[in-house]
Amino acid sequence: MMGFVTSIVEEAITKKGTLGQIGFITPSPPLFITISGAATVGTFVALAVTFYNANTGKMTARQVTRLLLAVMLLNIT
């Protein structure tokens, strides 16, 4: 969170975006596609591993509970 705040403050001071501060010209469609692609691939890999572990019975009871809490299928009050 502090990194985000620092980035916002530096953006206000330098009038450059976060990527512009480290030397990238923005807006840059190739950079956007690269960052979006990396985030998407990472998300789908994590999702695939989770489904694989759930279907093969490799998830612990704690992991199942955390997963159910994350998708709001379990309510602990």
Image (tube, grey):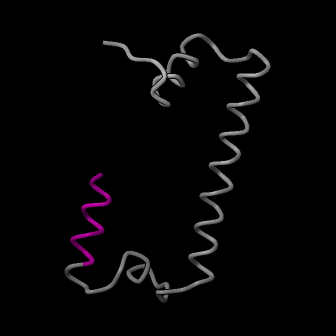
Where's residue 31, x and y in %?
58, 78
Q: Is residue 43 above or below residue 18?
A: above
Question: Residue furthest toward the right?
Answer: 56
* Residue 72 falls inside the magenta stretch: no
Residue drawn where x is 62% and y is 74% of the image: 33
Where's residue 65, x and y in %?
52, 16
Q: Depth check: give the residue in front, 73 or 31.
A: 73
Q: Report the quarter where the C terminus lies.
A: top left
Q: Depth check: give the residue in front, 56 or 8.
A: 56
Question: Residue furthest toward the front?
Answer: 73
Q: How many marks?
A: 0
Q: How would you classify the magenta stretch by its main secondary structure? A: helix
Highlighted range, magenta = 1-11
Q: Is residue 66 above or below residue 19?
A: above
* Residue 8 falls inside the magenta stretch: yes
Residue drawn where x is 36% and y is 13% of the image: 76
Q: Is residue 11 left or right of residue 70?
A: left
Q: Is residue 22 left or right of residue 30?
A: left
Where's residue 47, x and y in %?
66, 39
Looking at the rendering, which quadrant does residue 61 occupy? Answer: top right
Where's residue 72, x and y in %?
45, 27
Residue drawn where x is 38% and y is 81% of the image: 21
